Amino acid sequence: MTFTDDKNLAEKLDSEDALKDHRSRFFIPKNKNGNDVIYLCGNSLGLQPKSVRNFVEQELKDWEMLGVEGHFYAKNPWMPYHELLTEQTARLVGAKPIEVVVMNTLTVNLHLMLVSFYRPTTLRHKIVIEAHAFPSDRYAVESQIRFHGFDPKLSLIELQPRAGETILRTEDIEDVLDADGDEIAVVLIGGVNYYTGQVFDMERITTAGQAQGCVVGFDLAHAAGNIPLKLHEWNVDFAVWCSYKYLNAGPGNIAGCFVHERHATNQAIPRFTGWWGQNKNIRFNMGPTFDPIPGAEGWQLSNPPILPLAALRASLEIFDEVGMETLREKSVRLTSYLEYLLNNHPSKMFSIITPADSAQRGCQLSIRTKEGGKKIFDHLMANGVVCDWREPDVIRVAPVPLYNSFTDVFRFVEILASGTEAGG
Ligand SMILES: *Cc1c(COP(=O)(O)O)cnc(C)c1O
């Protein structure tokens, strides 16, 4: 696609945008003058779908009217409520329904998966993560290593980019797996790195890891709702993600978990258990014997929070209606437009560390500032742009296809440019 830096182009692209009407389904925060902010932070906290209120109010009403009876007689009975999300979640991540469940929060699910799939032995005790993994993942992995009596200094491998490069090459990851594979228990990569925005080749990494006998899992916090996924087909062992970033389900909302079908009935896999993972036919016998539900649902611990699930349903309904392929098409165009405007800007105050190849990135571009970077960021925030700053010098911006426009992108670059002059 060829772009120009003419403002009319932004308006033209917006008028031709098949998804343009979806913006009005979201609340766009306002700046102090009462105008819509330029919200480029959907990678951190997605905006509120206007439909959330009705979904949540339905449950408040049923609770008000029915009390405990709502478990069976609510419009959408609470007992099986989480099942209302199964099909949509499966479509979102390219899974079979038996492979997914919504439960807990992301880091909790990561621990539950590591309890089941990280079973270190003296010969095979290492976990591979990417350098600059999200801190929570790193803490979780290190604590699991220590929990099993191993030492992160010896058992944690961090994949580093080549000298002078910021993104990892798939062939380098494969080389590490080929060389050290027999000592590696688990490979855990962020499907989309939160800092650089790099999309990893999950299929190749899975194949390479499993060829060496490793379990391969992904943290999809920045991938779910951002890029199309095919977890079942790629043969991924497990995955976890949150719902409050690209999935717009609200701050701290309930997370997702994927366990491949081939583990669905494997009773040899140890796990931490709770009553909600129990065979539904006998759960309320309250007996002593645990018989897990086959598939991801068998990893549930508690009866789930209905109000957060209701908000997530509102959001997933929109994703299901639009479809990830359609979203992705606009996303590639929108982010390519942003890239074009940044690269064509006469000031050479910044560079983009996110891969230039659309296939290796999602919505987000991470902009490395050269000098006065923090001042440029402050200028953006003061002028109605919401994006984020990551030490030491990176501004992350994520135009999301559901509610961002080409005009948002154009205005962002205009304000960034005036900031680089101000930042000098
Ligand atoms: C956002 C994010 C988290 C946050 O974890 P929570 O348990 O939801 O607080 C963890 N890991 C990654 C990769 C993230 O992007």
Image: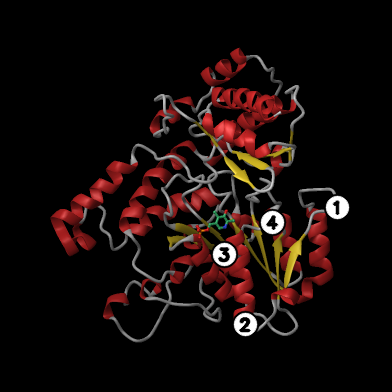
Ligand 1 within 8 angstroms of badge 2 C-beta: no
Circle 3/circle 1 CB separation < 8 Å: no
Give me the C-alpha separation between circle 1 and circle 2: 33 Å
Q: Are marks 3 and 4 in contact (CB under 8 Å)?
A: no
User: Looking at the picture, which amino acid does disc 4 mark?
Assistant: His
Where is 213 relative to 34, above or below?
below
Mark 3 or mark 4, earlier in chain: 4
Which quadrant holds the C terminus?
top right
Residue 28: in sight, yes or no? Answer: yes
What is the C-alpha distance between the residues marked 2 and 4?
Answer: 24 Å
Gap between marks 2 and 3 measured at Cα: 24 Å
- Element at badge 4? loop
| Residue 132: mark in rendering | 4
Q: Earlier in the sequence, mark 1 or mark 4?
A: 4
Q: Nearer the viewer, mark 2 or mark 4?
A: 4
- Pointer 1 residue: 163
Residue matched to label 2: 148
Quadrant of the picture in which ligand 1 is shown: bottom right
